[in-house]
Image: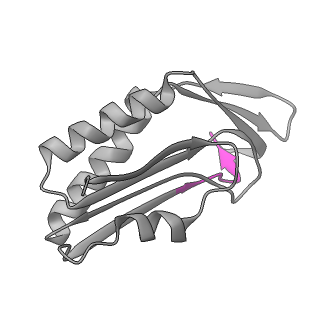
Amino acid sequence: MDVIRLLGIRDTPLSVDEVLAAVGDHAAGGTTLFVGTVREQDHGKPVTGLSYSAHPSAEAELRQVAEKIAADFPVTALAAVHRVGDLALGDAAVIVAVAAPHRDEAFKAARRLIDDLKAHVPIWKHQAFADGETEWVGAGE
């Protein structure tokens, strides 16, 4: 069975349960899950909401990131999904999960997966602040 169990760029709400189920594996002794959510402030300013946009190549780039993690770490399963479109405070923007034989491997691989996703997958955030200002934040933030 393929180690990469679930990847996606979606315009619908993300599910922690779906991501956890995707990486379920009896060979794993540890599973690490990261959920990135829309926070209520950034740069000390209140945020009212945000929108994510993705380049058409984003899902292919996400697959390349996942393949690199699978090659570099002894993982049994991994998953990563990112939301696009308009999100409200508290919404899940990104979820990654990694299962591995041991917890240390799962933690390290999950950290690298989210960091490389943020650095290399062309997804941009348009953030709106309570004072009416907006800000674009690109991949690699």
The residue shown at (86%, 36%) is 131
121 to the left or right of 86: left
Relative image position of residue 105 (x, y in whole percent): 16, 61
Q: Is residue 68 visible?
A: yes
Tell me which colouring the rendered structure shows. Answer: one colour
Taking the image as shown, residue 42 lies to the left or right of residue 28, namely right
Image-quadrant location for residue 31:
bottom left
x and y, in percent, of residue 130 in the image = 84, 41
**Residue 45 in magenta?**
no
32 vs 47: above or below: below
Q: Residue at x 15, y 42 (%)?
A: 71
Q: Tell me where the magenta segment starts and ends, as one range.
A: 36-43
The quarter of the picture where the N terminus appears is: bottom left
- Place residue 133 in its image quadrant: top right
Q: Is residue 70 left or right of residue 35?
A: left
Residue 141 in sight: no
Residue sitting nearer the eye, 12 or 132:
12
The percent position of residue 10, horizontal first and vertical second, equals 62, 43
